[in-house]
Amino acid sequence: MPVPARIDYETGKLRITTEFKISISEVISPRLTPGITRMLLRLSGRTGLFLTQKQITNPDNDPDAGLQVSCKRAGKLELSESESYTLKVTPQKAYLNAVTDLGALRGLETFLQLLDGDDQGYYIPAVTIEDYPRFPWRGLMIDSARHFQPVEVIKRNLDGMAAVKLNVFHWHLTDDQGFRVESKQLPRLHQMGSDNLYYTREQIKEVVSYAADRGIRVVPEFDLPAHCTSWLVGYPELASYPGPYNIADRFKIYKTSINPVKEATYQFLDTFFAEMAGLFPDNYIHIGGDENIDDSWDQIPEIIKFKKINGLKNNHSLQIYFHNRLAAILAKYHKKVIGWDEIFDPKLAQDTVIESWQGKEPMFHAVRAGFPCILANGYYIDLMQPTEYYYGNDPLPEGSSLNDSQQKLILGGEVMMWSEFVTPETIDSRIWPRTAAIAERFWSPPNIRDVDDMYRRLDIISLQLEELGLTHERNYPMLLRRLTGNHDIEALKNLVDVVEPVKEYERHQRTQYTTYSPLTRVVDAARPDAQVARDFQRLIRQLLTDKMLDENKLKEAKSWLLLWKNNHNNLLQIIKQAPVLQEIKGLSEDLAKIAAAGLEGLDYIQTQKQAPDQWIEIKMALLDQARKPRGEVELMIIPAIRQIIEAAGEM
Amino acid sequence: MPVPARIDYETGKLRITTEFKISISEVISPRLTPGITRMLLRLSGRTGLFLTQKQITNPDNDPDAGLQVSCKRAGKLELSESESYTLKVTPQKAYLNAVTDLGALRGLETFLQLLDGDDQGYYIPAVTIEDYPRFPWRGLMIDSARHFQPVEVIKRNLDGMAAVKLNVFHWHLTDDQGFRVESKQLPRLHQMGSDNLYYTREQIKEVVSYAADRGIRVVPEFDLPAHCTSWLVGYPELASYPGPYNIADRFKIYKTSINPVKEATYQFLDTFFAEMAGLFPDNYIHIGGDENIDDSWDQIPEIIKFKKINGLKNNHSLQIYFHNRLAAILAKYHKKVIGWDEIFDPKLAQDTVIESWQGKEPMFHAVRAGFPCILANGYYIDLMQPTEYYYGNDPLPEGSSLNDSQQKLILGGEVMMWSEFVTPETIDSRIWPRTAAIAERFWSPPNIRDVDDMYRRLDIISLQLEELGLTHERNYPMLLRRLTGNHDIEALKNLVDVVEPVKEYERHQRTQYTTYSPLTRVVDAARPDAQVARDFQRLIRQLLTDKMLDENKLKEAKSWLLLWKNNHNNLLQIIKQAPVLQEIKGLSEDLAKIAAAGLEGLDYIQTQKQAPDQWIEIKMALLDQARKPRGEVELMIIPAIRQIIEAAGEM
């Protein structure tokens, strides 16, 4: 995962033993040899083999080596650089060939994913792969502003990205709730705008270099003219409305903006971006541009006057003026611009990338005007939709009305990890494993879209991602232990296994959160795309569509329902000692009730008796009640129980 | 944990609600207010309460606040500074008073440990505590040389240390296998001595400041004159034997040393320690001094001649000469010296601290000569002994022959985490929770030594330590998943729950390890002090010593034995796909066999029939066979089964 562009399985196995070696004929970059050393460590870690080869530092042209790597040149970390590779594995030897070292790194990941074991030991199956990405811009955005994410969180996610062949780390570094980069030139930005949680310049360099080692570009985002409260804490004179300002601690859309009509603003931004351009080597800098709702632009005389004098007929025009000025500054420092939908203007430089958070139609609109675009809309993983939802979202869906050259302007897409509700403890469980499936959407041919097969493979990749330090699996029981205050989490886990956090923006609506609110409750432990519920749903669907009632499936369904039915009493004992769980007491009770209803329904079905209308009515009312989220989580087995009840009524 | 010097429980509960506040009348240091803010976050995290108080940045003298903190002055981070505090909790309010902010931080940890819940919500029980440490030097040593431990590993362990009131982080930064500090003055040290895994100066400052915030001193160790191969890679001209040198990748004691007779050595060390003295603010620098076995000191003419000229009658005298020269350099930079037993010499400055890795007798010897000492011997947690073993080791045992003023020279002790066999993935499970019990030995009165009660409390603190990011619990199932390559780890877990890594230095003897060897096998997943085995052992002891056979205990014992008996077949299925598990196949089979023997034995006992001698003989032979470690782990339920078999023979 992602599935290669072309893969042919052949017969035979290349055995991996302690003698296994990787050889490289020529060192063409400082990137590939440490990449191979990391691969050897991961291979050794997964197999427990004491490999005799410890690292590669020099050309090591050993014709007997099990994996022969070759590539022609060092890849440039820029848009549309070649990442293609071919991998041929025979029972005797494997050959990885690529144009660039980037392609070779991608191929090494594929090689490691192919590792398998049998009673003879470890092996790579014989296979011929030709592979290259469908889209050149395959990103993950992490918002470090709303909840700061320390360097180790970023690094382990970069490792995860590399494992699934993502190649752009979009780093949302500033927002109302925090300014997260040290600025030597304008130190009040991070000193007053960050509660002391920011990345030092050295840390930024460390991350950029870590990403580059893995063939990942780092595109920093400095969101302007709105979303900038944290800038204004230290520099209130730049604000449209007079300050003073404090760091925002709520998650609403703030009416703050940088003043677009003052020359001082542009001098300030020139100083700032000169420094940032030196810190971030990528060709692109993301300038934000979204959600500017500052009504000061209609109220401050100086701004009103400026619009009139310059013939800017509305605030949008003024914003475009601002972005054009900013783009000119960035051009001085040899940077191209990427920004959200709102920056779109036909007069922008034609290499400006529009990132669409608003939808495909706005994106197509920009494409038709000749601008390269990437899609963010539909990849908001913070909104807690199941993997399938994101996996089905194609940046360039079949049957679009774009012509060939327009289609080429769709550069790819980005996964969005906004951080209102994530801490370093929980962020990985929001990003992974779902992002692996989206990465496949960006890399693999468009016809790869079998959802069941995706979930099967996702389950495997999820464990492999753990090797890289990602915590999406391991932190789940840890969070449950904290909630129970105890090692005994079984009853709580039985419940939380079948709930998910509420979707879209519902969490904001239910509770007033600040940046200080605890993110350690059931809703934070609960994971999107609850697997137990999903498996149960599939089981019931199969059970009820089979022509003959399958005894094994029936037994399995009943044992799940019985577990849930009996769970509430056990959980009640825990809740008594753990007040933090009070909020899901009703939900637990409802789970028991609907599980009981499911059992009764299965009895009707098994005995081929039709359930009475009144019974159905009562049970459906029960389901309606159970649907109500409590503690901002919702039960995910309700559709399955509904199917059972409906089927019981049709016997 | 650690148990306070004096604690009196009273009646009533101080309720903790969203309105709970902490107030501080005077800000006497930059340490306490962030400490209180961290405490509020942890309190909020554990309870899920949306506390209205978000942080303290200024004096906040609110007479209604639930916890009133007061202290007189900023503590100095140096030996024997006051860490005492009193904590009085009434149903209305709590009062924390301390001389220094260090004492206040210790008291805040106690306050948080007291948090409990009932069906009314969270509360702190009414209590009066007077508390102070028994020993002023309570350390944890982490070896970052043999396996590098990134900054986040160090930070989370500093948090763990603070939670159990340890106050010295002894940082073993250089050894044969790596030089882990950036040196601006002598850059080949880290550049050539570290495989690029070292702490930058900025990272060192970050760690020192992070520790200081938590009231923890950082004592760096630069081990000389031996254990220094990594120094010599970049500066071979300083070696006793001529180079060149490579970074050591084995774990033997290397015969390398810095040349003690060259003036250039001392010029080099002067430059080096001038820089390090600026980087590490603590009064003490650890100069190592252990295990100098370099026979070059008997073979290099220059050194032989030097000894003769200077009347140094043996290598020990030469080493003492070296340490005295080094101590003089450190004195220039206002640093005192701490070193291992081998540096002991009556002519050293009397404030030199001797750290005894060799034993209590060598320590008492130094104490009698008037030197302050700390104990490391008996706290080597890398040697995988059970918690009880370390807990019972008192730096100043009852009945020692030391007089009062000599006793005062025993400053405390340090937990030793040597890193031959730990990675960032596994190091926490070696340090925690056992270190919490040792911390109690260093802090609490000497009569606190009830082992069962220690284990009961250890289990609770272990979960609380997870809140700080420590991974000792959560990484266990993760490592098992990697081994099975699957989410299904039950059969493997059943086995690994009752094994422990081999003890002492046996692992070195069984396998030839290098710094590149995988540390991802069963032995690395297995944890010291296997709790399931310990609990089973206690169960059997109780079962067999009760006058009447307790039916419930018998049932419980049988169900464990049945589980183990039936486990092997399930595990075999997993082993087939996971070659890394082949090494414990025999062990798994033996577990099944001895469990079956245990079941048979219980049947004899239950039916009050005496087991025949031949049966006993066969089963005892089985146990002998099962004792053999496989894959460097050993079964820990053998003594319990042996008890059963013996009891069956005595019916």
Image (cartoon, coloured by chain):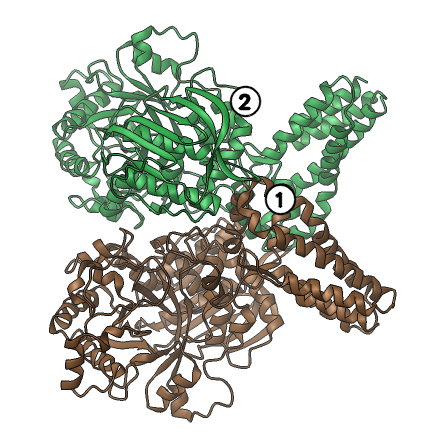
Chain colours: A brown, B green
Element at badge 1? Answer: helix
Marking on residue B493: 1
Whole-angstrom CA distance, mark 1 to mark 2, is 26 Å
* Residue for badge 2: B451
Decide: few, some or many residues near mark 2? Use Cα within 10 Å; few <14, some 14-19, many ≥20: some
Element at badge 2? Answer: helix
Q: Is residue B109 above or below residue A144?
A: above
The spot of residue A85 in percent (x, y) is 43, 74
Q: Residue at x 36, y 44 (%)?
A: B148
The spot of residue A197 in percent (x, y) is 29, 52
Label 2 sits on what residue type? Val
* Of residues A528 and B400, the one drawn nearer to the viewer in this rendering: A528
Sequence-wise first label, 1 or 2: 2
Observer-side mark, 1 or 2, equals: 2
The spot of residue A643 in percent (x, y) is 72, 69
Q: Residue at x 48, y 67 (%)?
A: A383
Confirm whether residue B417 shows in the render. Answer: no
